[in-house]
Amino acid sequence: MTKKIFSAEMAGVASIVVMLLAFPLSLWYWHSAYVPGQYPPGSRIIRLTAVAENGLWTQDRVIGYSYWWKKPSRVSEIRLVQGQHVVLLLHSPDVQHSISIPELRIGPVPIPAGHTVAVEFTPSSAGELNFMCVQVCGRDHSKLAGRFIVEPSKTAGRDPGLHASRLGGAIW
Amino acid sequence: MATVQEPLARTTQPETEEENSWRFDVFGRWPLLKRLVRMRSFQFALILPNLALFYFFLITGLFGTPVGNRNMIIVFVWILWWVVLIAGLMPLGSRVWCTMCPLPFAGDWLQRRAVIGVRSGKSPGTENRFFGLQKRWPKKLSNIWLQNFGFLFLATFSALLVTRPIVSVALFAAMIIIAAGMALVFRLRTFCNYVCPISGFLSLYAMTSTLELRSSDKNECLKCKTKSCIRGSDKGWACPWNVYMGKLDRNNYCGLCFECVKSCPNDNISLYARPFATSDYMIKGFDEVWKASIMLVLAFSYSVVLLSPWGVFKDWANISEKHLWSGFGAYAAGQMLLALIVFPGLYYLAIRLAKWYSSANAVSVREMFLAYSYMLVPMGLLAWIAFSIPLIMVNGSYIISVVSDPLGWGMNLFGTADFPWTPFKPDWVPALQVGVLLVGLYYSLRGLYRVASKVLPDPAQRNRSLVPPAALLLGITLVFLKLFIG
């Protein structure tokens, strides 16, 4: 090989190595740093997936490689802290779902199949908040429900009551 | 001279005025293109973006949403890539996809230990240094039967393939691994030549393409001592497709890697543009006849399953969701029976009738069966294009949304993540399909006439021999018309 071809060869190999690293790193950055950076500091980000089969909300990742064989575990209760900003990133891996949190007057927020949508709120008092799918999504639709247990914050002041701070549609 | 396996191609130059009517030397007209092609980094520069894309597709298939129409691997491969391949690259650029295909890249790398450069040296039958065991591919398998069965098998599970990202990932990963494994064991690109299911139909439909790579002067090739096109040199690798340019007369088994353009010491190889479906008429083996049959039947079968109003077939094919095993069995068996026995049987019957009706005693049924089967090639390709029209016009809008959110993670890279499913002029689809089918019928009939003229020089015999196969072509067209426009 001539010197010129050798340099091209090295450049070719380097471009492949860069490519092999660039995609995973970019996605990792997006997932771990960029998304959290879009919300107020201290926000709690909860990724929830609605699964029509067996009617469950799960925090497991129901994605390409795992949906085929992994049984996602049901999440019935999620503990929150009063006054902490919450971001729900909701995904549907099968059919269209829709979430509602009646106590906060949130929803119905549609979660189209294959989409991820964001819902944000700040629970300002302790108590229980129910969340559920409000679009008939299959025979186990009625099971697709859970609740947030909002625990009192040690630093919380007077209780102004529960309210939704913002309702997100599709994010970004 | 060459000790590698016998090249698969035969020789003819353009024989008719029609073939020569606007055939021109692309390199002669655009010398810059020739300069680019002769650069060592040319093929790599084409492969690299596709390698990056397919790598990203694998990532989206593994880590993206399992919802097919929201995952990039499904939308980009089975809608965009497929339509571009079958309706654009194939008819216009021959096997130019093989030039840039990323699937055998890892195998090539292992075999050559170079992505751009060339290694001079000695490996069996070549003037290049290759790595691996360098075994000879079995002669009995030196045909496209494996590709035929492979494609038919994959097509049986196409409902899974085009809806489940993980299945597409598994397919492409398997192809990359098999190609790499074969490159380490066998010489040259045996995977592409004999195993790759995509390569099988590309080889058949490349016959119709408006582009061909040929030697400019076959006599020059006969005089050539080095045969660098097939044996390689310090300027280019030995032909990965094992094609000797001095005998190349069909597009089928030339993967357009352009190594021969780089290595030819006489600058005797060029790229030619030619009219559509007017040059390569010779089907040379039963494996190719069955490939034509399989492709035509699959175009029919896919149209029934995906486009027809009979939802029961869709339910049968969609085994992963419907779990109708008996229905799936009937669908799979029916499809295989139709492609391997029923349709070839019908074609055979038409040829028997043609021979009987033409009283052509000088020609055997076998010869006629092989030669006339070219008529299935343009019809098959255009039937596939007709089938693909609704894919892009009805479902093409998924591309716009998926490009912004390739994994369904909630990204919005270009602001189009929420672009709704919007069919583009769906009312035009049937008219376009009819037009495309009629073009296919025209080219098939024309090809049939041309091969018949070669096989049977007597005009009366020729004309009579055309009646049964032409009737079969008309029948095929009517069946597709029924499917497309009811």
Image: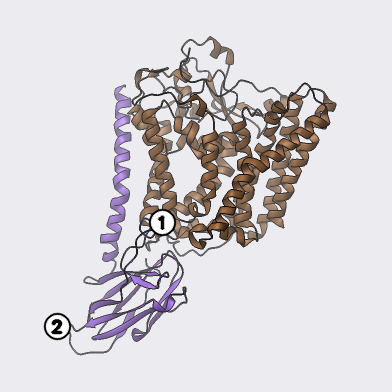
Percent across and percent down for residue B475 are: 75, 45
- Would you identify the image quadrant in which residue A106 lies? bottom left
Percent across and percent down for residue B342 are: 67, 43
Residue type at the position of mark 1: Pro
Which chain's colour is purple? Answer: A
Residue type at the position of mark 2: Lys
Residue B227 visible in the displayed image: yes
Colour displayed for chain B in the image of the structure:
brown
* 10 Å crowding of disc 2: few (<14), some (14-19), many (20+): few
Circle 1 sits on which residue?
B406
Viewed as shown, does residue B444 lie left or right of B272? right
Residue B443 visible in the displayed image: no
Which residue is rendered at x = 75% and y = 23% of the image? B363
Viewed as shown, does residue B450 lie left or right of A94? right
**Quadrant of the snapshot with the C terminus of chain A:** bottom left
Q: Is mark 1 on a helix, strand or loop?
A: loop
Dot label at residue A154: 2
Percent across and percent down for residue B119 are: 34, 22
Q: Label 2 lies in what chain?
A: A
Gap between marks 1 and 2 measured at Cα: 42 Å
Which residue is rendered at x = 29% and y = 37% of the image? A14
Both marks 1 and 2 on one chain: no
Q: Label 1 lies in what chain?
A: B
Percent across and percent down for residue B300 are: 64, 49
Vertical order, B77 against A112 (above or below): above
Vertical order, B353 against B87 (above or below): above
Nearest the camera: A88 or B266? Answer: A88
- Would you identify the image quadrant in which residue B471 lies? top right
Viewed as shown, does residue A68 lie left or right of B472? left
**Quadrant of the snapshot with the N terminus of chain A:** top left
